[in-house]
């Protein structure tokens, strides 16, 4: 490609004269037309990628299109030739093929997640859309013995050590020697301590062929309601950067949100993903992977500084590299809301899940529900309704005891990471409530039990409506078992009153949750539109 540099320069200038734009990174030249984009790979070899020959660049273009079509159906149009006729290059054409490019549909800059965030228009609804889409993508992604190998702690440790070797020439421009040593010791120490955890997740199929570069500027929300998501630019040039624990993928985007001053949205992303993927154990390693991802981002920016270029580009890269290296230091210590355990309970159809969901949204915390947990433990599809008799089959006491034990285990993982958690279950047995409170006491966090109540006629109408409408619900509650359920409910004892909040979910025209809000901490107001945390 170096021999083509003058001709590519002329092509670039000709297109710019026609109204095209161009961008350049350390590995690509990107030509942006009104409705399409042509992405040309540079003839570089950087150790972690090799685009040194035309054949390698062609193969990388093909891989980019194939891999990215997993996450967007209509953006990657294909691989097209750059042809030469005389001294001039053309996009496509019938001349001699001298280069290859990925051709894409151009998406509006205003739809990009970082642009939406800067404009104050990236909200929790869109974060939820992203979390669920990423969870769906991970669920369908390749997971086999080869991908699992990359979740081994020795492989991850090798990546960490490689990162520090590659930044050795310039890291001390951004961190003090003691800070660099502390960061290295923390990352390597985590891997040494948590080796069994990483091995267990690999065995569970949590190491998959993911995206590898989930950043805000790779997410586009299209449509009038900004509800149609396209995710672009996965890593195609090195499998080991894509083959990783799903938490490593997710942590990149969470880290990027935190880097932009929106820790609340970063936490909402983790929570909604954990629920969609039924993966609450990710909280045990997300702080490590956020630090790891921030360091990688700092490394790439630092390399761009070392490579030189226009002063404004170099200075911007230097500022950003400093920010990401410092974020790598601060991961696990960033300001979160004080952790607490909230258990939401009540009889059938008293609105437990609605209340728990609202609390999870308010706190950017995960909601762990007994219905989904039970079905996951039994290998039952969440959408499948069990019509077992009350307290029999999947709901027999022994199974229910195991379900509540698993709820507490998952809650412990989240709380130990320094984050709040909401449990959504009936908690009809006094011992179930006391065990949840004992967990909070053992971890030194506040406990709140929210009892949802509603008049019998309201509950019966909700159960009839739920079944007749075929509403999407994981719950197996139904009118036929209501009396048996109520007969087993154990009333709140005086020693439980101190941590109790009781709300009537049948109240119309008023916010039945209003009484809860003063009991909870609040996230700081987000930065004003147009500002960005530095």
Image (cartoon, grey):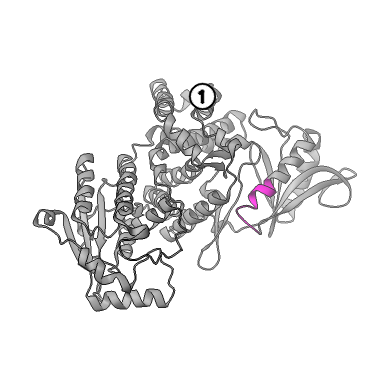
Q: Quadrant of the C terminus?
A: top left
The quarter of the displayed image where residue 272 is located: bottom left
Residue 119, visible in the rendered structure: no
User: Residue at (73%, 45%) from the top-left corner?
Assistant: 62
From this view, report whether residue 247 is shown above or below residue 113: above
Q: Decide if residue 98 is on the left or right side of residue 73.
A: right
Start-end of magenta stretch: 64-73
Residue 239 screen position, x and y as percent: 63, 37
From this view, report whether residue 274 is shown above or below residue 166: below
Q: Decide if residue 313 is on the left or right side of residue 10.
A: left
Residue 258, visible in the rendered structure: yes
Residue 161 screen position, x and y as percent: 51, 24
Label 1: how many residues lie within 10 Å, few (<14), some (14-19) or many (20+)? Answer: some
Nearest to the observer: residue 29 or residue 504: 504
Residue 196 screen position, x and y as percent: 43, 31
Q: Quadrant of the N terminus?
A: top right
Asked if the magenta segment contains residue 65, the reply would be: yes
Q: Quick one: SS at disc 1?
A: helix
Q: Decide if residue 397 is on the left or right side of residue 447.
A: right
From this view, report whether residue 202 is shown above or below residue 279: above
> Which residue is denoted by mark 1 in the rendering?
161
Query: Going by the picture, which residue comes out furthest to the left?
Result: 494
């Amino acid at each position: 490609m170096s021999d083509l540099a003058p001709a590519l320069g002329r092509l670039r200038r000709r297109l710019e004269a026609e109204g095209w734009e161009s961008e350049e990174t350390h590995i690509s030249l990107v030509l942006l037309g009104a409705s399409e984009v042509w992405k040309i790979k540079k003839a570089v070899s950087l150790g972690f990628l090799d685009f040194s020959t035309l054949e390698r660049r062609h193969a990388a273009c093909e891989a980019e299109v194939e891999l990215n079509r997993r996450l967007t159906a209509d953006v990657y149009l294909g691989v097209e030739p750059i042809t030469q006729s005389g001294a001039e290059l053309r996009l496509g054409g019938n001349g001699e093929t001298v280069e290859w490019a990925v051709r894409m549909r151009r998406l509006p800059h205003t739809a990009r997640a970082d642009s939406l965030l800067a404009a104050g228009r990236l909200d929790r609804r869109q974060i939820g859309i992203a979390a669920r889409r990423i969870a769906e993508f991970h669920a369908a992604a390749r997971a086999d013995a080869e991908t699992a190998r990359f979740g081994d702690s020795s492989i991850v440790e090798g990546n960490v050590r490689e990162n520090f070797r590659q930044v050795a020439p310039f890291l001390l421009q951004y961190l003090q020697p003691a800070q660099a040593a502390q960061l290295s010791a923390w990352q390597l120490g985590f891997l040494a301590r948590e080796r069994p955890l990483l091995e267990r997740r690999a065995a569970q199929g949590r190491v998959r062929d993911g995206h590898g570069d989930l950043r805000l500027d790779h997410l586009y929300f299209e449509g009038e309601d900004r509800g149609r998501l396209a995710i672009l630019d996965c890593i195609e040039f090195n499998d080991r950067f894509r083959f990783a624990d799903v938490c490593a993928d997710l942590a990149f985007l969470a880290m990027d949100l935190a880097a932009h001053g929106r820790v609340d949205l970063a936490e909402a992303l983790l929570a909604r993903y954990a629920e969609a993927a039924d993966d609450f154990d990710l909280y045990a390693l997300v702080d490590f992977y956020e630090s790891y991802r921030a360091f990688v981002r700092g490394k790439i920016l630092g390399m761009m500084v070392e490579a030189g270029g226009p002063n404004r580009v170099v200075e911007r890269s230097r500022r950003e590299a400093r920010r990401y290296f410092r974020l790598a230091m601060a991961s696990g210590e960033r300001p979160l809301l004080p952790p607490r355990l909230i258990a939401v309970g009540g009889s059938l159809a008293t609105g437990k899940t609605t209340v728990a969901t609202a609390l999870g949204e308010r706190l950017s915390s995960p909601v762990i529900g007994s219905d989904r947990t039970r079905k996951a433990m039994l290998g039952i599809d969440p959408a499948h309704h069990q019509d077992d008799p009350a307290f029999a089959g999947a709901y027999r006491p022994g199974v229910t005891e195991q379900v509540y034990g698993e709820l507490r285990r998952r809650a412990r993982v989240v709380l130990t990471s320094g984050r709040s958690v909401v449990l959504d279950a009936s908690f009809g047995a006094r011992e179930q409530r006391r065990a949840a409170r004992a967990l909070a006491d053992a971890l030194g966090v506040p406990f709140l039990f929210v009892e949802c109540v509603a008049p019998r006629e309201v509950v019966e109408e909700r159960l009839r409506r739920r079944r007749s409408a075929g509403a999407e619900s994981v719950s197996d509650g139904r009118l036929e078992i209501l009396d048996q359920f109520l007969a087993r409910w154990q009333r709140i004892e005086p020693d439980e009153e101190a941590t109790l909040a009781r709300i009537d979910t049948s109240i119309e025209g008023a916010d039945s949750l209003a009484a809860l809000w003063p009991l909870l901490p609040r996230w700081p107001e987000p930065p004003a539109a147009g500002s960005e945390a530095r």
